[in-house]
Amino acid sequence: MIMFIDMMNAIREFMDTGGQVLTVIAAVIFVMWLLIFERLMFVFYGYRKVKKHLQQTWFSRSEQHSWYAEQIRTALVARGSARLNQNLPLIQTLVVLCPLLGLMGTVTGMIEVFDVMAISGSGNARSMASGVSRATIPTMAGMVASLSGVFASTWLQRTAKRETELLEDSMPVAH
Amino acid sequence: MKKIINTVSGLLLTVTTSLSYAQQAANLDELLSQLEQGKIAQSEQNQQREAEFKAKLSQQDQLLTSAKNNRDQQIALSNRLEQDFQNNEIKLANQSDALNKRMGELKELFGVLQQVAGDSKSKFQTSVISAQIPGRDVFMEELAKSMGSSSKLASIEEIERLWFELQREMTESGKVAKFTTEIVLANGERTPSEVTRVGGFNLLSQGKYLEYINETGSIAELIRQPSARYLATAEQVTLTPAAITPFALDPTGGSILGLLVQAPDTQERVEQGGPVGYVILAIGLVGLLIALERFITLFIVGAKVKRQLKQPTASGNNPLGRVMLVKSQNPDIDTETLELKLSESILREVPKLSSRLTLIKIISVVAPLIGLLGTVTGMINTFQAITLFGTGDPKLMAGGISQALVTTVLGLVVAIPMVFLFTLLHTRSRNIINILQQQSAGIIAERAETEKGA
């Protein structure tokens, strides 16, 4: 319990030194990883059922070579691909947003530094330090968040592409 | 010129007077006799004067001697006084020597007294305890002054009072005390109110932080209060001062809280951005409105398309239905023509679904660019200030720089949600287009087969 409180205090202190932008970045990271986990769950568990259903629909057809059959196959593949690619653009956007938010934190932090300069002159390095920490911490947090998301989103995209191709190959057209 | 006029008029005057004399004399002989008589009268007068002076001669001698006597007396007095002064100097030196000898270590004590009194004075002036117990710094200042003058000695009472005040400061700084005094509210109103003092750190009243202004000796409510979770602890302390409660105190005794007042709030920040900032905000507002309109439209269209997927008959009120109508309108055409007609009708639907989305994308790109523009103009202003006033005043430059940075922030503040909104809307519209492009043919084929089978 005490360890938990200590942890909460440490996090709160970190958030305070980072300023309001850090809270936004934290929210973005949270949403991003929530979406990534949802995707991972789908790729590993939910997708199998979808794939099986699509393949069953295709193989249960009596004829597999007419124009109609080809159109139906395209539609089936497109349906699978759509399920696989769901939310991926959103994850990528969040990955791109993180450094932007970090940049915003930098600029707001610099404003704070210059505010301190405007009030107390350039001699007071100690009072400028809080602004500098607000400028640097969000940048770092944004970078870390973006890096953590880049790998996940790239992997998800490659997987979605590969799985779509596999699905297409697994439903042959009879000529 | 004036001088000349004066001399000329003077000459004229003498001429006229001599003329008047001449007029009195009837002829030259008469004038001559007159002159002679005058001369005689003058010499008589002179003789008379001489006689008078001689008569007074002895008197003048007397005056002279008395003046000399007086002078001698004064010189003697001066000498005597000078002697006295020297004697007194020696006596004084002896006496002060004796005083120094007798004071001995006491002198050091008085030095310490003066130093302590001076230090305590400045400490008491800034201490919030002075809000409860005023007037302590006055006593300290007087004590330090009288100690510094070296002609006065501190009395036992004064030394004891110093001790007492130091002890009182120490004791009070360990207490959470309540007292009633007049405070100045944020709107300038003065009301008597109950004030809670937390040691030597903070003053609180009704869950709000106060500041002690030493110059006027008044207690004022801070115009800007710290964030709500700190205020909650302050409220708790004012309600239950005896119990142990967590409290956010300002260890500097008010100077950190004082800086809060100087930090500008959001509205002042936006105003710092100037016209460029307002342009960015206006663009952001336009983008938001477009996004809202798109959201509603795409939501309605998406719902209709989903309903259409489940319904067997095509209706004309949604894109998918309109594409599917192509088949039912042309029941007997071959597959290749059908495919062409389908892609043609899909092409008709796509612009309606993806319209104005590029505008949001453009806004998300343009907003940071305008922010950059604001930064550059702000820097130009800063450098103009440097050209005019030099680099001597960092405050002058800092104001311009913070103005430049605000526009960058505004640009990012507008761009970030726009990127986000664009992705959401783009995904949504692409999903619908995807259904149209890749699945409409499939759906039609399925329907046709079921009809055939049936």
Image (tube, coloured by chain):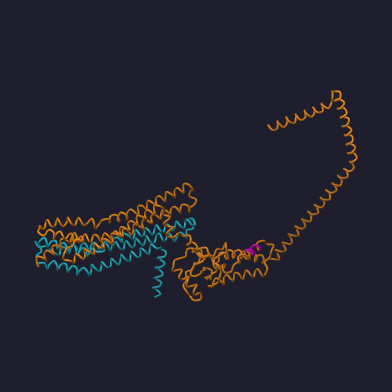
Residue B145 magenta: yes
Where residue B162 appears, x then y in whole percent? 62, 68
- A22 on left or right of B440: right
| Left or right relative to B386: residue A37 | left
- Which color was chain B given? orange
Q: Residue at x 79, y 54 (%)?
A: B81
Q: Is residue A73 left or right of residue B270?
A: left
Question: Residue A27, percent across and down?
Answer: 34, 65
Depth check, front residue: B118 or A111: A111
Q: Which residue extends farthest top?
A: B28
Front one among B321 and A63: B321
- Secondary structure that dominates the magenta span: helix
Instruction: Tell me how many marks there are.
Output: 0
Chain A shade in the render = cyan
Q: Of residues B406 and B255, which is closer to you in this image?
A: B406
Q: Residue B77 colored magenta?
A: no
Q: Position of residue A62 (x, y in %)?
A: 9, 67
Residue occupying the point 83% across, 27% down: B24
Magenta extent: B141-146
